[in-house]
Image: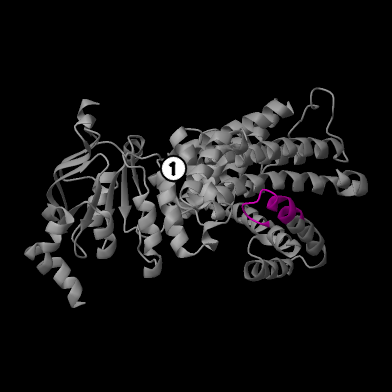
Amino acid sequence: MAAFLVFPSYLPLGSQILATILFALSADLVLGYAGIVTLGHAAFFGTGAYTSGILAVNGWGEPISGLLAGALAAAVIGVVSGFLVLRTSGLTLLMQTLVVATLLHEAANRASSITGGDDGLQGMQMWPIFGVFRFDLFGRTAYIYCLVVLFLCWWLARRIVHSPFGRSLTGIRENVLRMHAIGAPVMRRRLVIYTISAALAGLAGGLIAQTTAFVGLGFLSLDRSGTVLIMLIIGGVGRLYGAFIGVPLYMIAQDRFSEVAPVYWYFWIGLLMVLVVAFARGGIFGLVGRLRR
Amino acid sequence: MSEAARGAMLETRGLCKSFGALQVANSIDFRLERGARHALIGPNGAGKTSFVNLVTGALTPSAGQVLIGGAEVTDLPQSERIKRGLARTFQVTALFRRLTALENVTLAIAEREGVADDLFWPSGRHQRVIEEAYVLLESLDLADDALRPVNTLAYGRQRLIEIAVALGLAPKVLLLDEPAAGVPSSETGLVAGIVERLPPDIAVLIIDHDMDLVFRLARRITVMVQGSVLVEGPPEVIAADPEVRQVYLGERQRR
């Protein structure tokens, strides 16, 4: 909200940050709570983005239903791929999530008549939200739209994390052997959270597609899956608020540094990663928590 | 119910399991009565842990049957057997390390009560579950540690919480896999104390090497060697059995 008043010229970046926070939040649900290490979360982000985008390009520009369609499509990919990959764990699981995202990436590349292939998906016409609020040139509507969706999803994620189901996910992360031994349906629980997380990632992708009016193959890339993990680790994994710190920090730094030193900036983000892993396990949020104690 | 009334809470009939040429269970007939305090002993590699895994469903037998409360469970998965009252602890402490003792026990009770699928309402609404967990810890003299993360507790205390988590499932049959493993000998008494105070109608099977513990707790002992039951009987008979002395107690003294 503050950014809305203070930095009006940064609103488009602000919207992207909000949507990316949602993406990181969805990754935190599987990585931080259920302990499912994934390198393919962009599969769901991209599926949501392409679904919302393709609808808008083909004459259905109603934002809310387009967004929900994106979430639904991502959830379907989540439940189907989760059913297959969640049977494994560790490195095998990591590779399989990567494979799912790569398959989708290649599928989007091949289906260029629908997705625009390398050129990306262009020419979206978004209708006003509720038929009233137009997406303006300055990105005010887009910013508030993203803010509202993020808030609702954050509220939902918070409910889930603090529910008995959420506690049982923490149990699965801490000791899956013991969860089996107390009779928990581990596979089902993991599949449920994986699907919910996929839906939220789909919403995030849909938001970016709708507010930037562009979807490209990069939305499904390994780079996208990896970057969201980096942002999450910088902010702090498994605490729901890590995304709110790591994502803005990363994206604002990227925005600033890429003007000053476009190539060099990865050095600084790399250095930051090394410092976080070496001295601030639990990310910046974890560090703040420790200093206050 | 009539089956259960006859007494056998846990029974195996002709249980066999082999990994290739290695036979880890060779036609094991075993009965655990209601309220039993039974110990399973045997040298390393005798197949004690494999037996536990066959009973809990972690391993599938090559032949034979497993019955809980008189009903056959041989083809049922682990979770179904737990619902029928089978609980176990682990030789190497298997706790939710960064969670508090109270949370550890609460997770078990939440699974038993079926509230763990609730994905929307705060955990705090299930007050009954949390209260039950606290009462359980209190009954084991662990209330002081209830709010501490278990990885900050001494190993001896962790072994007690290991048992508390299993008790959270309100078991009819409790398998204790080396309950005092890794605990300094000065503290094994604490573990024994908890086992002695377990509700009398629970059937308890203790798998252990520690002869002092076994002879203190068990009213019946089964000796396993190379996947087979060598002999079964009350402690004084086992202690006097020349064959047992040779293969097991003798071997232990030699070390």
The chain letter under disc 1 is B
The residue tagged 1 is B168
Looking at the picture, the colour scheme in use is one colour
Residue pictured at 68% horizontal, 29% vertical: A66
Q: Position of residue A210 (x, y in %)?
A: 73, 36
| Image-quadrant location for residue A166 | top right
Residue pictured at 70% horizontal, 30% vertical: A56
Q: Quadrant of the C terminus of chain B?
A: bottom left
**Residue B60 forms part of the magenta stretch:** no
**Residue A246 forms part of the magenta stretch:** yes
Q: Position of residue B28 (x, y in %)?
A: 13, 48
Q: Is residue B187 above or below residue A159?
A: below
**Outermost residue toward the top in this view:** A131
The answer to which of A257 and A82 lies nearer the viewer is A82
Residue pictured at 55% horizontal, 55% vertical: B145
Q: Position of residue A216 (x, y in %)?
A: 66, 45
Q: Position of residue A209 (x, y in %)?
A: 70, 39
Total numbered circles = 1
The answer to which of A221 and B178 lies nearer the viewer is B178
Report whether residue A66 is seen.
yes
The answer to which of A131 and A30 lies nearer the viewer is A30
| Image-quadrant location for residue B221 | bottom left
Report whether residue B225 is seen.
no
Q: Quadrant of the N terminus of chain B?
A: top left
Please report the bounds of the magenta region as a residue range: A236-248
**Outermost residue toward the left in this view:** B242
Q: Is residue A255 left or right of residue A7?
A: left
Question: Mark 1 is on which residue type?
Answer: Gly
The answer to which of B46 and A68 lies nearer the viewer is B46
